[in-house]
Image: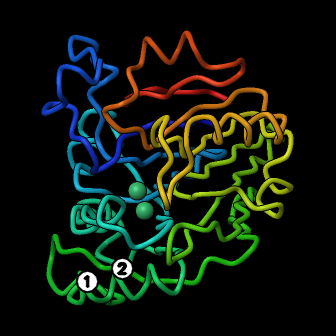
Amino acid sequence: MELIFLGCGTSQGVPLIAHPNEGLDLSDRRNHRTRSSVHVVLDGLHVQVDCGPEFRLQCLWNDIRHIDLVLLTHGHADHMMGFDDLRRFCEMRGGHAMPVYTTDEGEQRLRTCFPYAITEKAISGGYVALRPLRMPPVLELPNGCRIRSALLPHGSISSLGLVFEEKSSGKKLAYFNDCHRVTDEALEMGMHADVAVLDGLRPLPHPTHMTIDAACEAALAMRARRAFITHMTQLVDYATWKKKLPAPVEPAYDGLRVTL
Ligand SMILES: [Zn+2]
Ligand SMILES: [Zn+2]
């Protein structure tokens, strides 16, 4: 399985306008973060998780050439404003709709923001076509791999927590990107993950996201072999936190590729 971090930032605190006192070293490219999104390849099947505002650039920078299906974790702008840029990927399917597995709330937001795109066939060549589908607790993929899901609390809404299981290798990846708590159900689902990716917005508490400490606790409770923090603000300097975090937890960065 391959995990590509297209982005591991958030809309809060755009790094380029960080206050000097916040200690973010902008000469370190790993502190230049776009909105959180990952691309996962399981036994040759390409799964895109979220399409944020920088999705088009993220695809160019990371050489993303194919997408088989999309998962939308929830309908917040930082995870869905790039859906129109699935155009090229739809064109490569002959204009047939791209399956998008999401929640009720995610589907409503998609229909509100991209009404012209909710169609089985693109309205003309080069346009986007999306087929919203409800994410089941276990999504069986045509190649025998699986994606499990559980709802995670994220303020007044829920976000999809995802666990990817590759058939050929037996490897497991947990991706919990926007949540203020990892529920017992999600913890159980992600137990003994080869890699866990967790929302660690910043050191300070926030009503809808986990702190870095809470993310570390969840990674340790899950007994993950490796763990990465994502969805970070300008209060998280890469090099500083790389030293500070307890093994096996480390901060992610845009463009990071992990082979499981
Ligand atoms: Zn969110
Ligand atoms: Zn977010």
**Where ligand 1 lies, by quadrant?**
bottom left
Q: Residue 155, how many percent across, how many down? A: 50, 70
Task: Please determine whether, in this image, residue 116 is positioned above or below residue 207.
Answer: below
Q: Which residue is mark 1?
A: 117
Residue type indicated by callout 1: Ala
Task: Please determine whether, in this image, residue 219 is positioned above or below residue 42.
Answer: above
Looking at the rendered structure, the secondary structure element under dot 2 is strand
Q: Image point 24% across, 81% down: which residue?
A: 113
Residue type indicated by callout 2: Leu
Disc 2 and disc 1 in contact, CB within 8 angstroms: yes
Nearest the viewer among 182 and 60 is 182
Q: Quadrant of residue 158?
A: bottom right
Query: In what quadrant of the picture does the C terminus appear?
Result: top right
Q: Residue 246, how many percent across, how many down? A: 69, 19
Q: Which mark is residue 44?
A: none
Q: Which residue is mark 2?
A: 130
- Quick check: 45 left or right of 110? right
- Quick check: 253 left or right of 112? right
Nearest the viewer among 115 and 35 is 35
Q: Image point 43% across, 11% down: which residue?
A: 239
Distance from mark 2 CB to nearest ligand 1 atom below 8 Å = no
- Quick check: 79 left or right of 149? left
Query: In what quadrant of the picture does the N terminus appear?
Result: top right
Nearest the viewer among 6 and 35 is 35
